[in-house]
Every structure is written in structure tokens, then in C-alpha cells.
């Protein structure tokens, strides 16, 4: 895709671009609001403050973060700025929807004959239906996208610096340059680990430029105040407080601290130090000036290698797949809603609906199950089974009812509602209809695979009903696996008359195959259907091993 864009639009469209506020400002006026349309993980405040300094407006820029109770103060600031020729910067307009009508009124009242020619109104907002349309139509709009890739992130970080800052740490200029570059690279690595999904972090975190700026200030301060470089202090403030303050998962916190070990240490002071085996990312000589750093950063590859993140080569395949799915979904959304061969499309949808209706199982009779598996104190699995059937039946009823309604609507027997229209689009695009997924279990499968999986799940539950509690449970087949796990703990706690709060799971990987496990264990349960991503189970050595090339996950 990069080759396609480069060949048809030009190389600059795949290279990281930095925002040039001079161009936007040049076309603006006192009556034209300047609007930053934000996306997740972006904050243009630093760019605006730097631009204000360049324009000699740093002391004439009044900023306020909108929120509850900030309306009157913001209005007073704007009226004063219009008279004195100052700049006003209202951040996060989407967080103050109730004040947006007042802002719209203020903008409408700006009289070009009476407002100071130097006045400018700067606004930031996430996409929001409450944002005034009039301001959008009359303003200059800039979209602010987070930089993608280590090259783009490093370039963004160093574009905000200059030679004065690089040489500001008197007595430790060389150490400051090396550690500063290492810190900026660490910031880029943390941001880009998110693109690998759960392989990068269990939870995606929104690290910002503010985290990097405070770390820069602390790095400079600690280098100037201490004779020896306080690596422990630097690691703690960066890893546990500035970045770690956003991290809520214990394993992610451990990951951040381990990644930081490679960037905040004495070894990075070596001018020949390389951060990866391919030696793409390396330190620069201490005599390097700001322009030398920018030139080196611009020479970096656009696409990152997984090794700089400490990940397996397979991680890039996972990322590429996710990007492909996202792009294809966007393309599907851009497709015309009415096809030229509309009749053929309806025939396809009708065929798909009838096929799904014939394949999806009927609901399981709950009354018979409850009679056969009554609620028992000593057997919590009966309750688990009943709850599973209730959940699956709700989904099966929804599927059958909606498909029947869609077929009636296509024959003109009932009105084609908006929900049924969306459902027909999903069937045509081979995606699970929203009305089904709302009452279903989490799944990323396309519709055809989703139906096959649903049939297998219902067969698992039906086999349980027909043949009794299975020897080996298919944990992937549960609608709500948490209930099954709780039921297993409850059985153990009631058997030995102890509090369930004191019971936890122990795990053992069995050497026997599923077919060889013919008897249930005395305590606990056997399960199958677990998958591991980013590693594999070595059956010969009975340990975790590195993934094989192009093998993304194993059972």
C-alpha cells in the first residue's frame, strides 16, 4: 500500500509530516477561529506554545481547559483578548457541550470593524455532535493525528528542541545528549508498542508528549544537581510515576520498567551503542548538533522492525493483519449503499439469510434440562449449564426471529426497518450483525466462521445435556467462561467446607491427549481450547518456547 501511495501521490505522502502553523496562521484573520480536530493520543498545545514564542505572542496567549464552571471565565478572557489583540486558546471544547451555544454566540458577535486585528481564537476538540456547526464552517480546521512509527515520533520530539536546550546541561552536555536521545527513543517505543495489540501491552495506554516533557525536565534537573548520574531515580520517576502513573496492569508496569532498563543505563553513554541487533537505531557522537540529530532521524526507515520493541518477527504479521482488516472495513464503509445490480444483491442476501436460518440450531428446551440437572448444593456445574443454555437460547432466538423478519421484509410483508437494513448490509459484507453481537459472546470472526463456531458451541452444550458432565471441558465453547471457573472453585470449596475466597487455581499442562483423559479428576477439572499468542508450547520439553516463524498462535 505504501508503494501504491508513493507511486500515485508521491513519496512525501508516506513520509512523516510535521504541522506547520505558519501556513494556517497566514490565511487566518481575527474573525476566523482556528480549530484543531483531535484524535486519541494527541495534544497540539506544545506546538501552539512554541509557535506563540516564535511570533512573540508567548505573553499574549491566554489558555484555558474547558470543563464544568469554566464558561464565564472563558467568556471574560475572550472579550478582553478581542480588545487587547491577544490570542485565546480554549482546549477540549468537547468536554463542555453546555457552553458551546455561548461560544457560538460569542463568535457570531465578533465584528471585524471593532475587534483588534491581532486577536486569534484557537480551539481544540474531539469530534463531537455538540460542537457548533457555524464555527466549523467559518473556521480553519486542522486535524491532529498521532505520529506513526518510531521515525515520526522521534522527529516530532526533536522538532520541539533546539541547540540551546541540548547544551543547557552545564558540565554534562555529552551525557545529557545521549540520555535525552535515549529517552525520546523510549517514548517512541512505548507509543508504538500499542500497534501490536495485546503483544505490546495488555491494555492500550494513551501516553502523551506531556509525559516526555516532564521526563526531559527531570533528566536535566537531576544531571545538574547530582555529581553521579542517578539512574535509579531517573528510572523510578519515568517508569513508576510519569509513564507508570498511566499503567494500571501489573504485568504492563513490569514490561515498562524492563523496556526502560535498555534506555536509561550507563551503557547508552557509549557513542557507539546500538539499541538493536541490526544497528539501525544507535547513539550519535557527542559533538552532534540539533541538525545532525534531525538528519539521522530522517534517515531512519519508515517501517519499524519488531526487534527494537523486543518482539518476535511474527508481531509484524499480526500488526499487518490488523491494519489490513481496518483498511478493508473502511473501504466497505465507503462502498455505495445502493448497488447498480440491486436485484442481484437482494438475491444474494436472501440466499444467505435462508442458509443461516437452516443451519443455526433451534433453542435448547430449558425445562427438560432443569428437570434433568436440578440446582444442587454439591454440584455447581448444573447451575453453570442452565445459565449457559439461557444465554445461548437468547442469542438463538434473536437470530431466528431477525432472519425471519428480514425475509418477510424482502418479500414486502413487513416494513424494512433501519435495524433490518443494517442487518442485510452485514450479511452481504460477511460480518456479524450488530443486533446479534449485542447479545452474543466476544468474537472477531467473520459471519461464515462465526456461524460454524456457534454451531460447535451449541453442540458442546447439547452433548453435555445428553451425556452428562464432560470429562474435558471445551473452555472456548462457554458463553461466559467466568461462571464456569467460579463454579469449579465453588465445588471444591463446598466439598471441603472452606471459604471460596481462600481458594485459587493451580495449573498443570497434561502430557496425555484429550482422548486419553477418560475420567474426571478428583478435584478441579480438565479443560481444552486454550491458545497462546507470542509463544508456543513445546510438547517434547513440556515448557514454553519461542514461536515458529509465521505461526501466530498455537493451541
Image: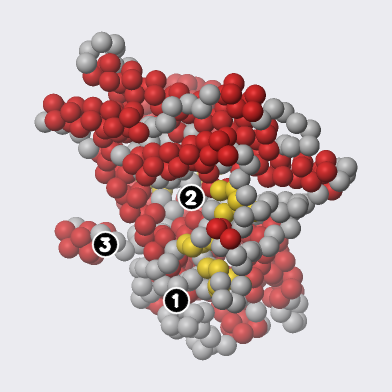
Tell me the residue that label 2 is attached to.
Answer: 42
Residue depicted at x 71% and y 64%: 237
> Residue 77: x percent and y percent?
56, 33
Asked if residue 227 is positioned above or below residue 302 in the image, the reply reads: below
Numbered disc 2: secondary structure: loop
At x 56%, y 72%, the residue is 539
Does 390 appear above or below 276? above
Q: SS for tag 3?
A: helix
Mark 3 or 2, which is nearer the eye? 3
Read off the residue under disc 1. Answer: 293
| Distance between mark 1 and mark 3 Cα atoms | 25 Å
Identify the mark at residue 67; answer none if there is no mark. Answer: none
- Of residues 258 and 469, the one nearer the viewer is 469
* Relative to 347, 217 lies left or right: right
- Can you tell which quarter of the image residue 29 is in? top left
The spot of residue 415 in percent (x, y) is 29, 12
246 left or right, relative to 294: right
Q: Secondary structure at mark 1?
A: helix
Amino acid at each position: 500500500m505504501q508503494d501504491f501511495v508513493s507511486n500515485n501521490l508521491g513519496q512525501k505522502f508516506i513520509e512523516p509530516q510535521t504541522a506547520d502553523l505558519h501556513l494556517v496562521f497566514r490565511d487566518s484573520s481575527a474573525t476566523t477561529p482556528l480549530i484543531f480536530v483531535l484524535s486519541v493520543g494527541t495534544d497540539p498545545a506544545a506546538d501552539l506554545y512554541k509557535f506563540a514564542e516564535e511570533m512573540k505572542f508567548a505573553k499574549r496567549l491566554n489558555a484555558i481547559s474547558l470543563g464544568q464552571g469554566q464558561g464565564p471565565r472563558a467568556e471574560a478572557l475572550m472579550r478582553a483578548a478581542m480588545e487587547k489583540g491577544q490570542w485565546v486558546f480554549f482546549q477540549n471544547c468537547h468536554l463542555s457541550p453546555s457552553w458551546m451555544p455561548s461560544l457560538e454566540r460569542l463568535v457570531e458577535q465578533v465584528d471585524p470593524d471593532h475587534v483588534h486585528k491581532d486577536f486569534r481564537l484557537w480551539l481544540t476538540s474531539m469530534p463531537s455532535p455538540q460542537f457548533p456547526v457555524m464555527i466549523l464552517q467559518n473556521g480553519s480546521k486542522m486535524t491532529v493525528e498521532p505520529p506513526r512509527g518510531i521515525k515520526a515520533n522521534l522527529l516530532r520530539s526533536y522538532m520541539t528542541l533546539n541547540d540551546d536546550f541540548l547544551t543547557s546541561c552545564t558540565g554534562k552536555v555529552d551525557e545529557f545528549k545521549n540520555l535525552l536521545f535515549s529517552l525520546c527513543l523510549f517514548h517512541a517505543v512505548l507509543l508504538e508498542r500499542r500497534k501490536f495489540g495485546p503483544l505490546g501491552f495488555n491494555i492500550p495506554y494513551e501516553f502523551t508528549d506531556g509525559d516526555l516533557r516532564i521526563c526531559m525536565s527531570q533528566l536535566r534537573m537531576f544531571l545538574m544537581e547530582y555529581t553521579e548520574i542517578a539512574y535509579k531515580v531517573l528510572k523510578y520517576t519515568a517508569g513508576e510515576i510519569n509513564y507508570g502513573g498511566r499503567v494500571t496492569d501489573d504485568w504492563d508496569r513490569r514490561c515498562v520498567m524492563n523496556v526502560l532498563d535498555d534506555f536509561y543505563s550507563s551503557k547508552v553513554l557509549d557513542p557507539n551503542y546500538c539499541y538493536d541487533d541490526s544497528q539501525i537505531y544507535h547513539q550519535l557522537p557527542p559533538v552532534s548538533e540539533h541538525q545532525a540529530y534531525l538528519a539521522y532521524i530522517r534517515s531512519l526507515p519508515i517501517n519499524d522492525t519488531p526487534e527494537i520493541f523486543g518482539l518476535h518477527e511474527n508481531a509484524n504479521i499480526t500488526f499487518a493483519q490488523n491494519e489490513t482488516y481496518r483498511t478493508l472495513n473502511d473501504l466497505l464503509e465507503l462502498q455505495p449503499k445502493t448497488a447498480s445490480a440491486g436485484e442481484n444483491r437482494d438475491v444474494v442476501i436472501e440466499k444467505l439469510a435462508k442458509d443461516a436460518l437452516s443451519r443455526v440450531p433451534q433453542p435448547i428446551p430449558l425445562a427438560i434440562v432443569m428437570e434433568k440437572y436440578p440446582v444442587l448444593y454439591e454440584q455447581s456445574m448444573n447451575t453453570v449449564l442452565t445459565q449457559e443454555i439461557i444465554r445461548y437460547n437468547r442469542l438463538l432466538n434473536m437470530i431466528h426471529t431477525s432472519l425471519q423478519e428480514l425475509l418477510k421484509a424482502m418479500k414486502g410483508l413487513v416494513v424494512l426497518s433501519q435495524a433490518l437494513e443494517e442487518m442485510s448490509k452485514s450479511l452481504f459484507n460477511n460480518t456479524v450483525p450488530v443486533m446479534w453481537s449485542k447479545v452474543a459472546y466476544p468474537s472477531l470472526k467473520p459471519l461464515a466462521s462465526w456461524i460454524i463456531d456457534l454451531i460447535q458451541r451449541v453442540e458442546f452444550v447439547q452433548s453435555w445435556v445428553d451425556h452428562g458432565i464432560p470429562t474435558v471441558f471445551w473452555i472456548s465453547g462457554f458463553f461466559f467462561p467466568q461462571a464456569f471457573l467460579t463454579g469449579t472453585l465453588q465445588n471444591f470449596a463446598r466439598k471441603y467446607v472452606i471459604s471460596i475466597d481462600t481458594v485459587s487455581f493451580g495449573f498443570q499442562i497434561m502430557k496425555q491427549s484429550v482422548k486419553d483423559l477418560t475420567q474426571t479428576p478428583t478435584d478441579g477439572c480438565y479443560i481444552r481450547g486454550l491458545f497462546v499468542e507470542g509463544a508456543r508450547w513445546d510438547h517434547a520439553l513440556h515448557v514454553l518456547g519461542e514461536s515458529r516463524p509465521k505461526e501466530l498462535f498455537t493451541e
